[in-house]
C-alpha cells in the first residue's frame, strides 16, 4: 500500500486541505473512496485506515482528509462551517476527477462527516454507486446540543462561541450552530442515491432511531445494518472489524 501526503487547495477560501491518499502499489485503481471523519476526529481514524487496508488489495483507493480546524489543518475553528466542509469534499472530488480519467468515486463517512455528505448529496444531486455511512449524525443539531456542547445552549448562544474537541481543541461559533438549525436532514434530503448505513444499536451519541427513521422514509434506497451491542465508537472486540467487512463488501458490489 502506498500512502501519498497531498494538499488540495480550497480555491474559494484559499486554504490547503491536508490529505492522505492510500493507493495500491500497482497503481491500477478502479474506484476511489473519499473518507470523511467525525466531529473532533481526523484523517488518521482507525476505521479509515482499516478500511484502506481492506480496499487496497481490491484496487480501490482511499483518500482521507481533515475538515477545517481538525487534525493538522492550518485553519481555525472560525473556518469550521458546513459550507466549507461541503466545499472541501467537492474540492477533493474535483482533484480525483482531474487526475484519474473517468474513475468511479464513492464515500465512507462517519458521524458528522456523514451529515456533511448527506447535505452535499441533497444540494448537488449527483449519483454515486458506493456510499457507506457509519453511525451517521443525521440529527446533528440535537447531537450538538445534547452530546457535544459542554455548556448550556443559552450560555453558548449568549457568548457566541466556545472551545470544543478532543486531542485538538477548536473554537465553535454561533454561526456554525445556526447552520445546523437551518440544515435539517429530514426536511431537505431527497435524492436517488442508494446508501448503506452501519449503526450500533447502543449508540449514545447518534441514536440509531434516527437511522431507522431515515431508512423507513427512503425505503429501498437505504440499507441499514445494525451492529448489536455497539455504541458510537465500535470499540468492543470484533465491532470495528464487522463494520469494515460490511463496508468493504458493499463498496465492492456497488
Image (cartoon, helix red, strand yellow):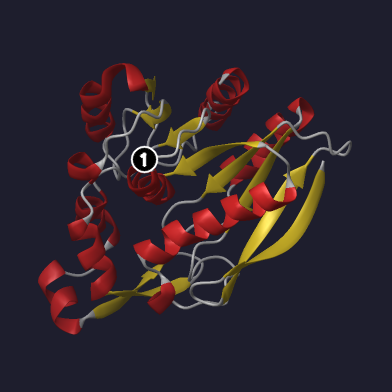
Q: Is residue 78 above or below residue 151?
A: below
In the picture, residue 194 is in which quadrant?
Answer: top left
Q: Residue drawn at (55%, 71%), measured in percent from left and top? A: 11
Q: Residue 17 placed where, x, y %?
A: 59, 66
- Viewer-proximal residue among 57 and 217: 217
- Viewer-proximal residue among 67 and 15: 15
Q: Residue 95 placed where, x, y %?
A: 65, 55
Q: Looking at the image, which residue sits at the far left?
A: 154
Residue position marked by numbered label 1 in the rendering: 136
Is 69 left or right of 24, judged from the image as shown? left
Q: Residue drawn at (63%, 35%), measured in percent from left and top? A: 51
Q: Residue 13 placed where, x, y %?
A: 49, 75
Is 5 left or right of 203, judged from the image as shown? right
Q: Secondary structure at mark 1?
A: loop
- Viewer-proximal residue among 101 and 218: 101
Q: Residue drawn at (25%, 73%), measured in percent from left and top? A: 175
Is 111 left or right of 241, judged from the image as shown? left
Amino acid at each position: 500500500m502506498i500512502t501519498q501526503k497531498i494538499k488540495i487547495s480550497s480555491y474559494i477560501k484559499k486554504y490547503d486541505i491536508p490529505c492522505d491518499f492510500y493507493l495500491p502499489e500497482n497503481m491500477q485503481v478502479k474506484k476511489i473512496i473519499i473518507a470523511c471523519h467525525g466531529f473532533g476526529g481526523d484523517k488518521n481514524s482507525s476505521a479509515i485506515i482499516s478500511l484502506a487496508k481492506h480496499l487496497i488489495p481490491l484496487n480501490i483507493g482511499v483518500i482521507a482528509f481533515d475538515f477545517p480546524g481538525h487534525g493538522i489543518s492550518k485553519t481555525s475553528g472560525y473556518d469550521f462551517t458546513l459550507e466549507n466542509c461541503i466545499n472541501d469534499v467537492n474540492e477533493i472530488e474535483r482533484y480525483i476527477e482531474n487526475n484519474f480519467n473517468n474513475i468511479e468515486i464513492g464515500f465512507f463517512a462517519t458521524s458528522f462527516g456523514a451529515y456533511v455528505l448527506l447535505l452535499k448529496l441533497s444540494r448537488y444531486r449527483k449519483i454515486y454507486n458506493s456510499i457507506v455511512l457509519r453511525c451517521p449524525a443525521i440529527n446533528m443539531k440535537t447531537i450538538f446540543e445534547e452530546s457535544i456542547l459542554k455548556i448550556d445552549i443559552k450560555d453558548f448562544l449568549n457568548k457566541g462561541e466556545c472551545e470544543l474537541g478532543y486531542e485538538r481543541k477548536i473554537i465553535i461559533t454561533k454561526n456554525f450552530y445556526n447552520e445546523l438549525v437551518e440544515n435539517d436532514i429530514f426536511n431537505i434530503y431527497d435524492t436517488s442515491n442508494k446508501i448503506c448505513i452501519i449503526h450500533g444499536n447502543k449508540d449514545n451519541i447518534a441514536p440509531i432511531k434516527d437511522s431507522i427513521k431515515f431508512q423507513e422514509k427512503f425505503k429501498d434506497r437505504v440499507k441499514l445494518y445494525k451492529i448489536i451491542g455497539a455504541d458510537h465508537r465500535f470499540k468492543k472486540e470484533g465491532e470495528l472489524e464487522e463494520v469494515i467487512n460490511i463496508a468493504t463488501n458493499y463498496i465492492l458490489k456497488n
